[in-house]
């Protein structure tokens, strides 16, 4: 036991692992260092919480702090959701688009939110994506390149919880090339089939499938870009094993709403030329629920026998989407940047 700067600390070694315990404002905290990563654990109202610190950036949720109702017009949106002529969670999920800059929303709409909208750019034989070549470079002087670049450099309308600030520097990061992924088997047999199944499930819950609400553009960093792009069935296997940070919001494959978070969070990995690459993906997130670190397996029931379709880090302003179904993602583009 020691006292530092007027605060009380305890330290003990259990089973060869180092633990610290601190009592702050009447609440109990534990801190553990495992494999060089920093972890915090807190018990609130009988519930167990975990938080992982990644390069000094983390998010813990509101912890019942009413001040968070003032962030991102959360309280007015909650009231609107209660008064809406549709389920409150559907209305709240539609309001997520207001957290993005209008210019990004415009670029997303131009690219499209459905499998069919992606195919209009394809140049493979018959636009079928059945060629052995899966990556096709997008011309720098095309509007398609400009729209993808805008998604990559976009600044959110509401300050981000992760890697916030210094957006000017991120916007100045040069894009070296954009490659379009034309994998017809993965797009048609896996992603499109899942989207159709998702729309059918939502219909049974009296929810109209709405592209841009139940599908989202997001980013993913990985060292397996080529493997994901070439896979004939599905590029992502969410529940095969946990990735970096995968226990923070539950099991699945993690996607960042903002490319800045994926890049500055060191999730983007170098490609064959040594420059970092990011996958620009279209997600079929359906109806999302809040993720939990101790969650594994299928998601909770939303209505009747229908479960939630994905999880997020915040139901007010999500910046991380966690996908549990392998067919719910299509890697549409690969962005290589400096």
Image: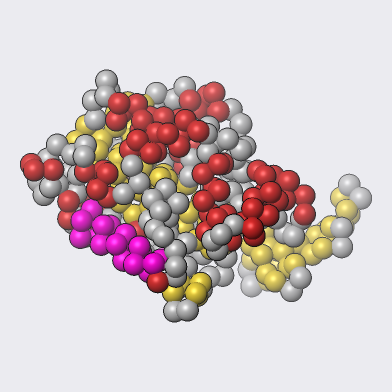
| Image quadrant where residue 19 sits | bottom right
Magenta stretch, main secondary structure class: helix
The magenta segment is 187-203
- For the point 87% across and 50% down, which residue is it? 4
- For the point 87% across and 58% down, which residue is it? 25
Number of numbered callouts drawn? 0
Instruction: Tell me: 308 left or right of 276.
Output: right
- Decide which of 190, 209 is in the foreground and name it: 209
Q: Is residue 172 visible?
A: yes
Residue 289, how many percent across, how many down? 53, 63
- 148 in relation to 223, above or below: above
- Decide which of 275, 78 is in the foreground and name it: 78
Q: Is residue 265 visible?
A: no
Determine if the magenta segment contains residue 272.
no
Q: How is the image coloured?
A: secondary structure
Residue 73, how many percent across, how many down? 67, 44
- 302 in relation to 125, above or below: below
- For the point 24% across and 38% down, which residue is it? 180
- Decide which of 11, 253 is in the foreground and name it: 253
Determine if the magenta segment contains residue 198.
yes
- 171 in relation to 181, above or below: above
Q: Residue furthest front?
A: 85
Q: Quadrant of the N terminus?
A: bottom right
Residue 7, how many percent across, how many down? 88, 53
Residue 222, how many percent across, how many down? 37, 47
């Amino acid at each position: 036991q020691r006292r530092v700067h007027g605060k009380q600390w305890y330290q003990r070694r259990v089973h060869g692992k180092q633990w610290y315990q601190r009592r702050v404002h009447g609440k109990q905290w534990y801190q553990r260092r495992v494999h060089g990563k920093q972890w915090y654990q807190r018990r609130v109202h009988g519930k167990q919480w975990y938080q992982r610190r990644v390069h000094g950036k983390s998010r813990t949720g509101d912890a019942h702090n009413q001040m968070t109702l003032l962030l991102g017009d959360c309280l007015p949106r909650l009231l609107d959701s209660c008064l809406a002529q549709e389920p409150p969670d559907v209305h709240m999920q539609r309001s997520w688009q207001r957290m993005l800059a209008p210019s990004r929303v415009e670029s997303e709409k131009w690219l499209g939110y459905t499998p069919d909208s992606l195919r209009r750019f394809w140049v493979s034989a018959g636009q079928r994506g059945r060629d052995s070549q899966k990556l096709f470079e997008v011309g720098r002087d095309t509007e398609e390149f400009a729209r993808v670049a805008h998604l990559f450099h976009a600044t959110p309308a509401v300050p981000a919880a992760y890697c916030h600030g210094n957006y000017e520097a991120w916007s100045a990061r040069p894009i070296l090339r954009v490659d379009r992924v034309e994998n017809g088997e993965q797009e048609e047999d896996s992603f499109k089939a899942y989207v159709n199944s998702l729309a059918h499930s939502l219909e049974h819950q009296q929810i109209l499938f709405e592209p841009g609400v139940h599908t989202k553009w997001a980013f993913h960093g990985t060292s397996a870009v080529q493997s994901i792009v070439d896979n004939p069935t599905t590029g992502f296997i969410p529940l095969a094993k946990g990735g970096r940070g995968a226990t923070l919001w539950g099991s699945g494959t993690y996607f960042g709403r903002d490319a800045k978070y994926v890049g500055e969070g060191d999730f983007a990995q170098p490609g064959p030329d040594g420059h970092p690459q990011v996958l620009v993906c279209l997600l079929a997130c359906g109806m999302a629920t809040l993720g939990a670190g101790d969650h594994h397996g299928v998601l909770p029931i939303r209505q009747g026998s229908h479960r939630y379709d994905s999880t997020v880090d915040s139901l007010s302003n999500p910046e991380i989407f966690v996908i549990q179904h392998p067919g719910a993602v299509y890697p549409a583009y690969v962005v290589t940047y400096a």
